[in-house]
Amino acid sequence: NRRIVLAQRPRGEPDANTLRLETGPVPEPGAGKMLLRTVFLSLDPYMRGRMNDAKSYAEPVAIGGVMTGQVVAEVVTSDLDGFAVGDMVLAGSGWQDWAVSDGAGVLNLGAAPENPSWALGILGMPGFTAHAGLLNIGEPKSGETLVVGAATGPVGATVGQIAKIKGCRVVGVAGGPEKCAHAVDKLGFDACIDHRAEDFEAQLAAACPDGVDIYWENVGGRTLYAALPLLNAFARVPVCGVAAWYNLAGLPEGPDRGPQILSTILRMKVKMQGFIIFDNFGPEDYAVFARDMRGWLAEGRVTYTEQVVDGLEAAPGALNDLLAGRSFGKMVVRVG
Ligand code: NDP
């Protein structure tokens, strides 16, 4: 059994000393347990936060502990009702080849699910985040303008496509011309601006002639500062993530933005709300999401892009790529 454990807490970007690959025996499932073989491992930005020993919504990974993560796995042996050998499951067993489970928190996907890895993306946590956060906190109305950063990632691409279905003008922000072209040509966004462009702020303003009614916060940084002055009265800002800052070791250099941020919220009567998907939303919301998303995928109204990386040993480098914007679409590792 190969497993990737947290060797030491990183300062800044994780490096070769942060994670360690260990090898051991395949675990023995006892009575009332099942043995799972990992097929796909999801890589997600929140994993960087779990490396820090900081107050947050979840406990950090312990030093020497297996990195947390959602996987799609195959049931290899089972002494559990409801899980048969050969079933594919969605489980939280982390960065390892094999795991023993008592079935708690494990979702059975059935014997031969179509696109099993989608349970980690468009039909799973990122898709649910986009759907529940946008409809309940963003409250999109036809004719409004929405701006979303990390526009081609699993959350951003889904937020933008749902906003289009709801009749919004959708302006993406992404890193590089290839991602921007994808957002417009494949995802159907009205515009997408490259946040690395020198005149990024002016381009974003020009793409939002009627201002911004919903700013979906995925990244923070320059994207946030460019969107703030464009917010309309009663704008909504679902705070989903601040990916531009996950590798920060301390406060960044530069002007104090606190006054600009708070006075904009005040003057524009902005509703800004942070949320953590499984804390703010429950099974009823999930059922609505699953029904909507399956329908939109079947009708071709939502498209989904995945980047599959091979081998568990590739996961640490792939996570750094994801955080730095070197991934394209939802990043998953094919483990076995
Ligand atoms: P992505 O695959 O979109 O990865 C993050 C992206 O952020 C990068 O690919 C990059 O895209 C962008 N980015 C990184 N640095 C910068 C920067 N300096 N400026 C602008 N953009 C940057 O991730 P997800 O779709 O999985 O997640 C999107 C966000 O949603 C994350 O912040 C994540 O933590 C959050 N999230 C929150 C949840 C919740 O419950 N609150 C649940 C799930 C996700 P690009 O190349 O386009 O710049």
Image (cartoon, rainbow, N blue to C red):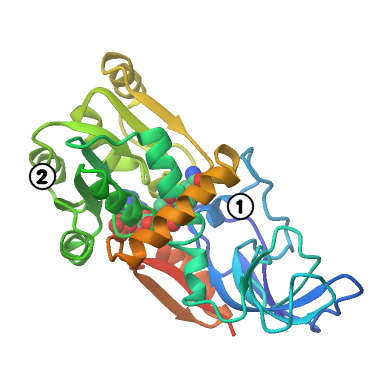
- Say which residue label 2 marks: 203
Q: Does the numbered disc 2 mark a residue whose Cβ is under 8 Å from ligand 1?
A: no
Asked whether the beta carbons under mark 1 and mark 2 sit within 8 Å of each other, the answer is: no
Say which residue appears at 67% left-offset and 74% top-offset: 96
What label sits on residue 186 in the rendered view?
none
In the image, taking residue 153 as reference, residue 222 lies left or right, namely left
Q: Secondary structure at mark 1?
A: helix
Spatial separation of the CA atoms under disc 1 and disc 2:
35 Å
Picture coordinates of residue 319, whole percent (x, y): 48, 65
Picture coordinates of residue 63, whole percent (x, y): 72, 58
Nearest the eye: 179 or 72: 72
Nearest the eye: 117 or 291: 291
- Callout 2 environment at 10 Å: few (<14), some (14 to 19), or many (20+)? some
What label sits on residue 50 in the rendered view?
1
* Residue 240 to residue 270: above or below: below
Nearest the eye: 298 or 100: 298
- Callout 1 environment at 10 Å: few (<14), some (14 to 19), or many (20+)? many
Picture coordinates of residue 143, whole percent (x, y): 17, 36
Say which residue appears at 73% left-offset and 62% top-offset: 65
Give whichever of discs 1 and 2 has the lower sequence position. Answer: 1
Name the kind of residue labelled 2 in the image: Gln
